[in-house]
Amino acid sequence: MAEVPARGAGPSLPRWRLGSLRETGLLMIIAGLCLAMSFASPYFLTWDNVRAMLMSFSIEGIVVVGMTVLLIVGGIDLSVGSVVCLAMVITGKFFLLGLDAWSASALAIVASAGVGALIGGCVTVIGLSHFIASLAFMVIVRGLCLALTQGTPQSLFALPPEFKFIGQGMVGGVPVVILIFGVVVLMSDFLLRRATLMRKVFYTGSNEKAALYSGIRTGHVKFWVTVLCSALAGLAGVIYTARFGAATPTFGVGMELNVIAAVVIGGASLKGGSGTVLGAVLGLALLSVVSSSLILLDVSPYWQDAIKGLILLTAVTVDHLLNVKKVMR
């Protein structure tokens, strides 16, 4: 059985060393922005606003986790917003047909993982790029959502209270959604930093040919990471269903851009081989703080998208310049 390359032969895996992590810079930016907003608006640091910010990105953060691992392996998924919507639609459809909510949600997650398997097959078997394959499935899945619902939102207020609890409940004053998000982030970040198996993700993304020659089945790695990304999007869709008690066939349009922006801002390279879950979550937190700040400052919604776009452009530019610097060395 082939061994994973030795530590010195591949990319440096992320470690918990404060001061050497890119996340430290993001934390400083977020802290500085929060401090400035505390003077600009008396409502910013209230518990209600902080909880609203956490709720606004907690479920989307689950999708960010999957996208982070996929970007590290060198892929990208433009279909996550559509897959989130598909999970909502399938959960609602089967529930309205008489299936219990838990079984319906399990089928939705399996179907979401199936979309990831199809994208992964297009990449590893046919040879398409992740960008092209996921772009095609973004349109296909969105069309399927519209076809299954005839373009009409599904009202799911009859969902059982215990199912709604995962999206609307509280434990000790903290929303269950935030607790689920925290567990997913901590587990995935720990595994990505410490698990030997996860080295294959970094080596594949850093230099696929070298990883292949060393015995790593890079096709399998890329396939299963793609499935994981879609499955997490499906999980997010189920939680959204429990939170809103409805399934709208247009939900999640544009979500993929926000997710990718957060991961890139958090330090993941679009060329693969680098990134952390914690960094991606901090990137998403920064976008959430910016959005909340713009709302409280009464900035026009049209300008809000432009400002977010400038933040993404800055992050991508910095990533490009850092990669050029590494090549020159």
Image (cartoon, grey):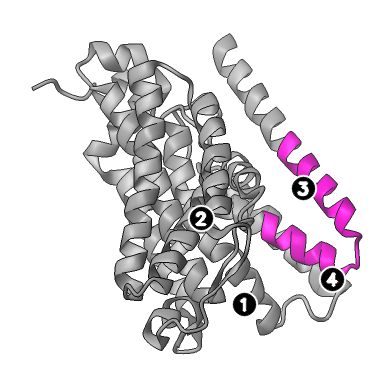
Q: Earlier in the sequence, mark 2 or mark 1?
A: 1
Q: Is residue 302 magenta?
A: yes
- Locate residue 101: give its quadrant: bottom left
Q: Quadrant of the C terminus?
A: top right
CA gap, disc 4 to disc 3?
Answer: 16 Å
CA gap, disc 4 to disc 2?
Answer: 38 Å
Percent x, y of residue 213: 25, 10
Judge from the rendering whether residue 323 lies leftward or rightward of residue 238; answer left or right.
right
CA gap, disc 1 to disc 3?
Answer: 21 Å
Give the residue pinned by disc 1.
Answer: 51
Judge from the rendering whether residue 92 lies leftward or rightward of residue 39; answer left or right.
left
Percent x, y of residue 289: 71, 62
Q: Which mark is residue 308?
A: 3
Disc 2 or disc 3, which is closer to the eye?
2
Residue interval drawn in magenta: 287-313
SS for callout 3: helix
Q: Earlier in the sequence, mark 2 or mark 3?
A: 2
Relative to the observer, which residue lies in front, 136 or 180? 136
Mark 2 Cα-neighbour bin, 10 Å: few <14, some 14–19, many ≥20: some
Give the residue pinned by disc 4.
Answer: 296
Q: Earlier in the sequence, mark 4 or mark 3?
A: 4
Percent x, y of residue 28: 66, 55
Q: Amino acid at mark 4?
A: Leu
Mark 3 Cα-neighbour bin, 10 Å: few <14, some 14–19, many ≥20: some
Asked if the residues shown at circle 2 and circle 1 are in contact, with their CB atoms under 8 angstroms apart, the answer is no
Q: Residue at x 67, y 23 (%)?
A: 321
User: Magenta: predominant secondary structure element?
Assistant: helix
Residue 181 appears in view: no
Q: Amino acid at mark 3?
A: Lys
Mark 1 Cα-neighbour bin, 10 Å: few <14, some 14–19, many ≥20: some
Q: Which mark is residue 148?
A: 2
CA gap, disc 2 to disc 3?
Answer: 33 Å
